[in-house]
Structure formats: structure tokens, C-alpha cells
Image (cartoon, helix red, strand yellow):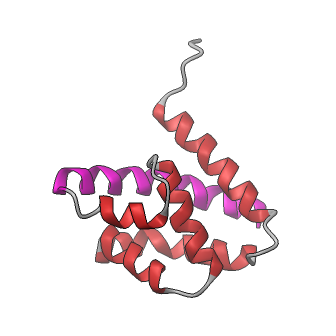
């Protein structure tokens, strides 16, 4: 077996690390984090990633901010503000990022169910 990880393996590992960190984070209520993640996929599919990110950015809950920070890190960005800027670049980048976030989200939802 190759020592090189597939994109799915890297995504699963990243999701595991971030969900584990959220579960141990005293600043957020893990049940709130889990609840937001469970509805996020439907929101992205119906409203789009850009509107979902904008809505989460406008919310005061720390679990919304944490999710955006995790997504930004997953995409190799420095902040949630960088994430917002990136989504305004091009439609091909937007579509690719949407697919990558949806893949990450599926793993995050699986792990939160296991930890919840």
C-alpha cells in the first residue's frame, strides 16, 4: 500500500482533527456545533456556498465562526475573511471550493454523530 494519502483520506483526517478539537473546545457548545453542521449541506445546496458563508459570518455564535475558520484552513487560507474574498474570484474556483467543502462537511457530520 502506498504511503501517499488520497484526497479523501486527507479530508477525513482533517475533519477528524477539527471535530475532535471542537469537542474539546470550552468556548463552544459541541451540541450547537453539531446541529449547525447537520443543516449546512442542505443550506449550501439550496443557497450556495457564498450565501452560506455570508450568513455564518453574520451570526454571533462561536460555533459558526469556528466552522468558517476550519473551512478557511482546509482551503489553505489564513482567515474567514480570506475565505469570503476567495469565493468572489471566479466561478471555477467557487465550484471547486463548494465540492471540497461539501466533502469535508460529510466527514465532519459523520464524526460529530460518533462523538455526540
Report x, y in % for residue 61: 61, 84
Dominant SS of magenta comes to: helix
Q: Residue furthest toward the left?
A: 91
Give the extent of the magenta segment.
90-116
User: Observer-nearest residue: 16 or 50?
Assistant: 50
Residue drawn 47% across the image and 34% down it: 7
Confirm whether the magenta stretch covers residue 94. yes
Residue drawn 17% across the image and 57% down it: 91
Residue drawn 32% across the image and 64% down it: 85
User: Observer-nearest residue: 61 or 41?
Assistant: 61
Among the 4 quarters of the image, the one containing residue 19: bottom right
Instruction: Name the side, left or right, on which 70 lies relative to 75.
Output: right
Report x, y in % for residue 33: 65, 73
Above/below status of 83 relative to 52: above
Among the 4 quarters of the image, the one containing residue 82: bottom left
Confirm whether the magenta stretch covers residue 36. no
Above/below status of 52 relative to 110: below
Instruction: Name the side, left or right, on which 24 lies relative to 89.
Output: right
Where the C terminus falls, by quadrant? bottom right
Where the N terminus falls, by quadrant? top right
Instruction: Name the side, left or right, on which 4 lies relative to 83.
Output: right
Amino acid at each position: 500500500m502506498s504511503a501517499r494519502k488520497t484526497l479523501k483520506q486527507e479530508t477525513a483526517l482533517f475533519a477528524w482533527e477539527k471535530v475532535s478539537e471542537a469537542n474539546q473546545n470550552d468556548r463552544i457548545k459541541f451540541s450547537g456545533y453539531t446541529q449547525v453542521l447537520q443543516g449546512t449541506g442542505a443550506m449550501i445546496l439550496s443557497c450556495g456556498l457564498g450565501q452560506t458563508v455570508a450568513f455564518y459570518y453574520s451570526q454571533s455564535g462561536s460555533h459558526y465562526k469556528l466552522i468558517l475558520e476550519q473551512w478557511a484552513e482546509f482551503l489553505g487560507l489564513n482567515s474567514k475573511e480570506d475565505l469570503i474574498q476567495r469565493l468572489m474570484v471566479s466561478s471555477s474556483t467557487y465550484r471547486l471550493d463548494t465540492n471540497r467543502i461539501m466533502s469535508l462537511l460529510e466527514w465532519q457530520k459523520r464524526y460529530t454523530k460518533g462523538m455526540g
